[in-house]
Image: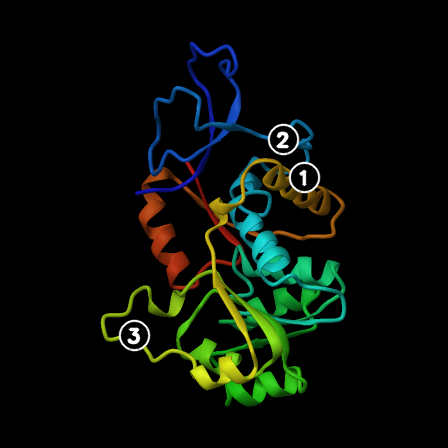
Amino acid sequence: MMGQQVARVVESKNSALPTGTIVVAFSGWTTHSISDGKELEKLPTEWPDTLPLSLALGTVGMTGLTAYFGLLDICGVKGGETVMVNAAAGAVGSVVGQIAKLKGCKVVGAAGSDDKVAYLKKVGFDVAFNYKTVESLEETLKKASPDGYDCYFDNVGGEFSNTVICQMKKFGKIAICGAMSTYNSTGPPPPGPPPEIIIFLELRMEGFIVTRWQGDVRQKALKDLLKWVSEGKIQYHEHIKEGFENMPAAFMGMLKGENLGKTIVKA
């Protein structure tokens, strides 16, 4: 299985990566791996001792970068705008909401349990709701932002997204990051959003994968995220499982929504 890990070099013939170096590696679900060093990334030199190294997989890593670029580049949010994010208590969504607040936006988040809703309110979401228990998603969204939404950060897809898209503001932007509602589906996919809504509201929808952003822009984003976390402006929560043998259970639990924040397996 593919996947990132924070790893320690245990033996080395590479002077740039001596034994003991901590790296981020895309080595998959392995306890040990061999590398020529080209695909290994050292942690930022300014990484403080007070932060767990596992954040390099989450808030100061791939999921944090996904939130950062999806919100700031794809949606191009500006202060005063209203942002909607689903799966908002997950590894990506929780960072999306907090960056949006840093930029002066109003943020509405949907999550799948009352505990997750409480967490979203704790980290600064203006409105948070449990999509599993509301009587009407459409009415809940309207109440949260009667004027509609400037940006929609979509982790879910399906019928949920169709409902949100109908409440976008003119020239709204939609960053399509995931489609959780369809990952385990065995039937035909639900119909897409009404094309007339997209046309008349002149919406812009764009799917993206975070590996698009490399080089200097990626390094700047990592520095911004590390700074915000170090200053307490972005809070994080990790759902940690102990034991390499628990990788499959942790992965399936994440897909079922058992996690709050980033799911991490400590081998």
Which residue is identified by label 3? 189
Label 2 packing within 10 angstroms: few (<14), some (14-19), many (20+): some
Residue 64: image location, x then y, percent: 57, 49
Q: Nearer the viewer, residue 178 or 52?
A: 178
Q: Is residue 263 left or right of residue 107?
A: left
State if disc 2 and disc 1 touch (CB < 8 Å).
yes
Which residue is identified by label 2? 44
Circle 2 SS class: loop
Residue 239: image location, x then y, percent: 50, 51
Quadrant (top left, top right, bottom left, bottom right) of the C terminus: top left
Res 171 quadrant in image: bottom right
Task: Give the colouring mode of the picture.
Answer: rainbow
Residue 264's tag is none
Circle 3 SS class: loop
Which residue is identified by label 1? 223
Q: Is residue 191 left or right of residue 133?
A: left
Res 254 quadrant in image: bottom left
Q: How many marks?
A: 3
Q: What amino acid is found at the position of numbered circle 3 in the picture?
A: Pro
Label 3 packing within 10 angstroms: few (<14), some (14-19), many (20+): few
Q: Residue at x 60, y 63 (%)?
A: 75
Q: Nearer the viewer, residue 5 or 104?
A: 104
Circle 1 SS class: helix
Residue 95: image location, x then y, percent: 61, 56
Q: Residue at x 38, y 60 (%)?
A: 255
**Which of the two discs, 3 and 2, labels the residue nearer the N terminus?**
2
Q: Please state which of the two labelled residues, at mark 3 or mark 2, is closer to the viewer.
A: 3
Residue 117: image location, x then y, percent: 59, 70
